[in-house]
Amino acid sequence: MNKISCNIIRDILPLYVDEVVSEDTRAMVTEHLEQCGECRKQYESMKNKVEVPVENDIRPLKRFKTAWKKKKIILVCLTVLITVVCVSGAVFIYDQTQKQALLYSKEYVVGQPGIRGNVDIQQYVSIDPSFDIGANKYGYPVFKNPEKALDALKELYPDAIALIQSEFDLAELSTDTCQWYKIYGAQLETGTQEEKEQANFIARFLDIYENSYFAQ
Ligand SMILES: [Zn+2]
């Protein structure tokens, strides 16, 4: 065997030991090893070196375990995160759907199946066009645009609203306080006859207004 051939064989040996060479190369190397003691010695020592660490060295296993632990922690965190996102997403959608159900979604026609009460829409619209009334999902009367309607109410009856507020020591009229204004508006004893009538209308207005925000 010449030297070049041995050199080439030794270059290939690591691949040969790992069994990643092609069929032809493997046959060539095997044939060479049968005839060349030097290369065979090299091969034997290489083969042993490869096998010993795999059997005795547990570091790779430890490393693998540590890596797996880290992956497990990341996996658990991801699972928790995804669960939190999904649950809060579902709660948000449920909440929005509930809120949406209280708003105007169909026409309010007295006597129609599923429509509750007998509100005279024309009476409200004749006072202000933004007092237009429809029905929510449950058939209760609601203002088609409750925010615009409340703004119009505040503009139309500032004195009566102020009177209810001071008489019963209430916070400013808003969605949060509308139920108090509704109760006390119907009970106003002071003020002129006109203011009492206005306070009474405010109470009836808010009885419809609250349907957009509070379930019955
Ligand atoms: Zn050789």
Image: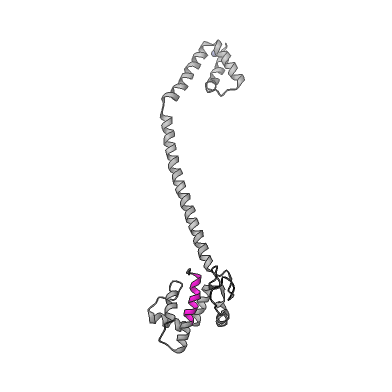
Which of 155/181 is in front?
181
Q: Residue at x 47, y 50 (%)?
A: 83
Q: Is residue 211 above or below residue 62?
A: below
Task: Residue 137: give x, y in percent of width and height.
Answer: 55, 67
**Left or right of 135 in this view: 216:** left
> Looking at the image, which residue is at 58% across and 75% down?
111
On the image, the x and y values in percent for residue 172 come to 42, 76
Residue furthest out toward the left: 169
Quarter of the image for residue 62 reads top left
Give the x, y percent position of residue 157: 48, 82
Give the main secondary structure of the magenta stretch: helix
Q: Quadrant of ligand 1?
A: top right
Residue 46: x and y, percent?
48, 19
Quadrant that contains the N terminus: top right
Q: Residue furthest right?
A: 24
Residue 180: quadrant of the picture: bottom left
Q: Confirm whether the magenta stretch covers residue 169.
A: no
* 85 shown above or below 115: above
Give the colouring mode of the picture: one colour
Residue 206 shown in magenta: yes
Q: Which residues fall within the magenta stretch?
A: 201-213
- 69 or 131, which lies in front? 131
> In front here: 30 or 183?
183
Residue drawn at 55 percent across, 15 percent down: 6
Q: In this figure, what is the number of numbered marks?
A: 0
